[in-house]
Image (cartoon, rainbow, N blue to C red):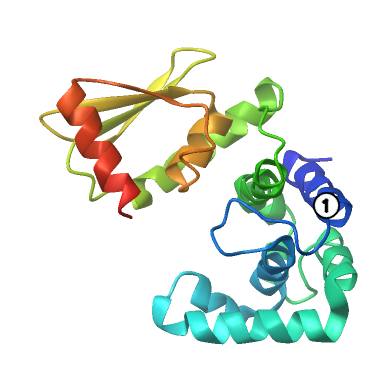
Amino acid sequence: MTFAHDERLALCDDALRVGPEAPTLDEGWTVADLVAHCYIRENDPVAALGITVPTLAPLTSRHMDAALRRHGFEGLAEAVRNGPGRWSPLRLPGVDALVNGTEMFIHHEDIRRGSGEVTPRDLGRAAEDGLWRGLGIALLTLHKAPVGVVLERADSGASRRVKAGTRTVTLVGKPSELTLWVSGRRQAADVRLVGEPDAVATLTAFTTSM
């Protein structure tokens, strides 16, 4: 089994445990909304475009609502548990493990921490290494940051620069916590910002306004 597979099962288990109306770290989204998002991403390629294309976001929202009406919350959770749809490219051998580890981890934590389980889990070195490799998402979320940004692993000291700048802020944390921070879950992530106070304040103001 892979980390992506384990997180998928755990996400569905926790979704069913806390229930459809429970809050998540995604502002305005309940657990039912999050499960519908996961379902659309893997089973509705047209509507899934709205996840990354803002002008298509209303289409994605309509399809999420329709999926919940058609399958029900528990049905959608079981569909997500079973993995990508038959025709999804995410079903190709190896693709799920490569692409979905970070995705499933983030949304599992959206449920866990949104429902009050704030203590970080001990994921183990292999999972942390995989999330570290997946931190290329920081290049997308922080490419317009007004200061330089370096990510540093709290568990090994390894680092990578994701944004150049004359002033630099270093984000220190386990890869799992850094993943939450760069994906917008900043208040919930156990990450320390290191740098000149004005640089830290500038980065904090930038990311808060995103």
Residue 135, horizontal then vertical, whole percent: 47, 39
Name the quarter where the C terminus is drawn.
bottom left
Inspect the image, locate mark 1, and give the three-letter code of the amino acid beneath it. Val
Image position of 199 (left or right of 126): left
Q: Residues within 10 Å of mark 1 (few under 14, many from 20)?
A: some
Residue 46 seen: no
Residue 118, horizontal then vertical, whole percent: 66, 33
Residue 204 seen: yes
Q: Which secondary structure lies at badge 1?
A: helix
Q: What is the residue that sits farthest to the left in this orientation?
A: 166
Residue 51, horizontal then vertical, whole percent: 52, 71
Q: What is the residue that sits farthest to the top in this orientation?
A: 156
Q: Please name the residue that numbered disc 1 is placed on.
A: 18
Vertical relation: 87 (above or below) 116: below
Q: How many marks?
A: 1
Vertical relation: 178 (above or below) 8: above
Image position of 39 (left or right of 169): right
Vertical relation: 61 (above or below) 164: below
Judging depth in this view, the residue of 202 and 41 nearest the camera is: 202
Judging depth in this view, the residue of 111 and 150 nearest the camera is: 111
Residue at 86% x, 77% y is 72
Residue at 51% x, 38% y is 179
Residue 81, horizontal then vertical, whole percent: 85, 59
Vertical relation: 39 (above or below) 64: above
